[in-house]
Amino acid sequence: MSLHVFLYGAGVSSTLDSPPVLTLDASARTVPRRRTRFLALPEARWALLATAAFLSALPLHFADAPGWTYGPLYAIAYLAGGWEPALEGLRALRGKTLDVDLLMIVAALGAAAIGQVLDGALLIVIFATSGALEALATARTADSVRGLLDLAPATATRVTADGEESVPVNRLSVGDELLIRPGERIGADGRVLDGTSEADQATITGEPLPVLKTPGDEVFAGTLNGTGALRVRVERDPADSVIARIVTLVEEASRTKAPTQLFIEKIEQRYAVGVVAATLTVFAVPLAFGADLTGALLRAMTFMIVASPCAVVLATMPPLLSAIATAGRHGVLVKSALAMERLGEIDTAALDKTGTLTEGAPEVTAVHPATGSGLDEAALVALAASAEHPSEHPLARAIVAAARARDLRLAPARDFTAKPGHGVTATVDGRFVTVGRPDSDLDADADAGADTDAGTDTGTGTRMDRDTDVEGGTVVRVERDGALVGTLVLADRPRADAAETAAGLTALTGISPVLLTGDNPRAAAQVATATGITDVRASLLPEDKVTAVRELQRAGRKVLFVGDGVNDAPALAAAHAGVAMGRAGSDLALETADAVVVRDELAAIPAVVRLSRAARRLVVQNLLVAGTFITVLVLWDLLGHLPLPLGVAGHEGSTVLVGLNGLRLLRESAWRRPDEGRPRAL
């Protein structure tokens, strides 16, 4: 069963049968962690049986007991620990592939054939144990991300015209209205329509404290509602929720391999064939010069064991998969091991502006009542918001949001009309109000006498040009009964962590990021100044962004591009590695990117680059460890006398060491920045 089917098929219960506990203690705020138990794995149970049989036979063997007392125990150890790798090896051989597992089984049987039953059993036990540890490592890697599945509600309360009904979350649709009772988990990504509460969304956003939720706020599936009841409108299909994206992308990641891994697997077959040929040579040459059969065969079996590339094969994927799991826990979904490896290779960063370095939505940044209007800043905002309230335009929503942030009363608007690209008119408290751009002609037909000349004085000592991008944003005129009463300035502000992110990428790559934007040079320069970026390229079409990325790559750079919109998708595809902003990112950008920042926190981007580089360092470490062990043990066997048990212990020990080293990135400390003393919740 795939993770996706599990999430939306079987699921887990989320509604509370008993009255909810309204005080959220620490246990309620932690992520449910489903850690796979060692004995839950069949590989672990077979390895344990093999080990128990071996340890039971060992004292009898050393005590010179009759062979019938310990022989069956050794046989159990051989069968329990060797049947599965032998079967897999034979299946691979049928497909004309030589598996290293089969080499181990042949070596163990060869040792038994010359009377070294104990040594062969030891090889089987250690080999089975290392396989069980590898299976546990793989399971724990999946556990670290799949623990989010436990947050997914199985049912939700849907509000209908006839009342309420409990429905499976996979039957919810965009536009459905949900009732979230105190203490329940939210059933879908959506927006609050009514009610006030606090939501514990640490597992999704990393925020350590519950977040106040009021009408208009976004909520996430699987987060825990606090003490208030909420009515939520579903805005995203359950299959596209943040949790579902994690599941889907982790599934995709598990099916991909990094270039290093692909290279290792490509040479593995040739290497294995070479080991078999070398083993036959190690056996035949001494035998031809008069060596005894047992000694020659024992040396050859030892050589086959220590020369097998088990540790080399295991060197690559555990670090990369561990890094993917850790990044996923912190809100960065890396789609594949290939993508994780490429993120660590970048030496230049290129960033989009709108929606990436900036919030992507306008905010009221300045309020200028006109001289003699009789309005102060609060009254001007309230008047504009009252007129704009029925509108769905982004500027209108920003003005209304500014009024709500100031707790201003909005008067009802009558006779509302909107003209796309210009603004709105409405009657507010019996007065005719116009809110629009300086070059608006909304009032021309109404003969309201509005002065829309490009050089109109705003009453603030500033004359507005027809280019509305002044004062760092877009200017909106507010008129009442045809007379100018003030202006509002709206701007798309840089994200709070934009400057930190630019500095972090500069520290990682050694050069300042490049700003690639389709916006005008003035707006681009303002954002660049605020974030410390020096290389600014503005007024770019999508193909221009691709050209800029390719120019950098032709200069020998490996470019990381970060964007969010449809117009960024070509550059995301052209870059060495692409990262999309997930919360507001377009579907095309999300599909094209190598990684997705789920909660739009820019500071996670340098963090995941550091994590990727740490994974690459572990891969190199693992390859050096594996290569060193193989070289030393092979030379010892060829030039001296390497006891079979010691060769087995060295070979399997290096395999276990490499596997455990790769899991170091599962630790919370792997997400730390170099200058931090404790983990940082991004």
Image (spheres, rainbow, N blue to C red):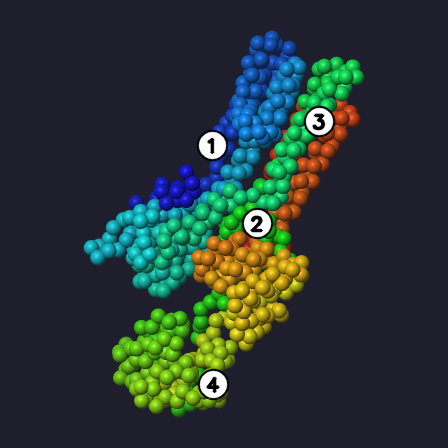
Please tell me which residue lies in front, 619 or 21.
619
Residue at mark 4 to residue at mark 3: CA–CA distance: 84 Å
Residue at mark 3 to residue at mark 1: CA–CA distance: 39 Å
Q: Residue at x 75, y 14 (%)?
A: 292
Closer to the eye: label 2 or 3:
3
Q: Position of residue 278 (x, y in %)?
A: 71, 26
Whether residue 418 sits left or right of residue 96 in the image: it is left
Whether residue 563 sits left or right of residue 162 in the image: it is right
What's the amino acid at mark 2?
A: Met
Q: How many marks?
A: 4
What's the amino acid at mark 1?
A: Ala
- Tell me if I can see residue 402 in this picture: no
Dot label at residue 278: 3
Q: Residue at x 68, y 38 (%)?
A: 625
Whether residue 290 sits left or right of residue 82 in the image: it is right
The residue wearing badge 2 is: 340
Please tell me which residue lies in front, 3 or 142.
3
Q: Residue at x 28, y 81 (%)?
A: 427
Contact check, label 4 and label 3, Cβ < 8 Å: no
Q: Of callouts 2 and 3, which one flags the residue occurring earlier in the amino acid sequence?
A: 3
**Quick one: quadrant of the N terminus?**
top left
- Quadrant of the rendered structure where residue 432 is? bottom left
Contact check, label 3 and label 1, Cβ < 8 Å: no
Is disc 3 placed on a helix, strand or loop? helix
Q: Is disc 1 surrounded by few (<14), some (14 to 19) or many (20+) residues within 10 Å?
A: few
Dot label at residue 40: 1
The residue wearing badge 4 is: 464
Residue at mark 4 to residue at mark 1: CA–CA distance: 72 Å
Is disc 2 placed on a helix, strand or loop? helix
Closer to the eye: label 4 or 3:
3
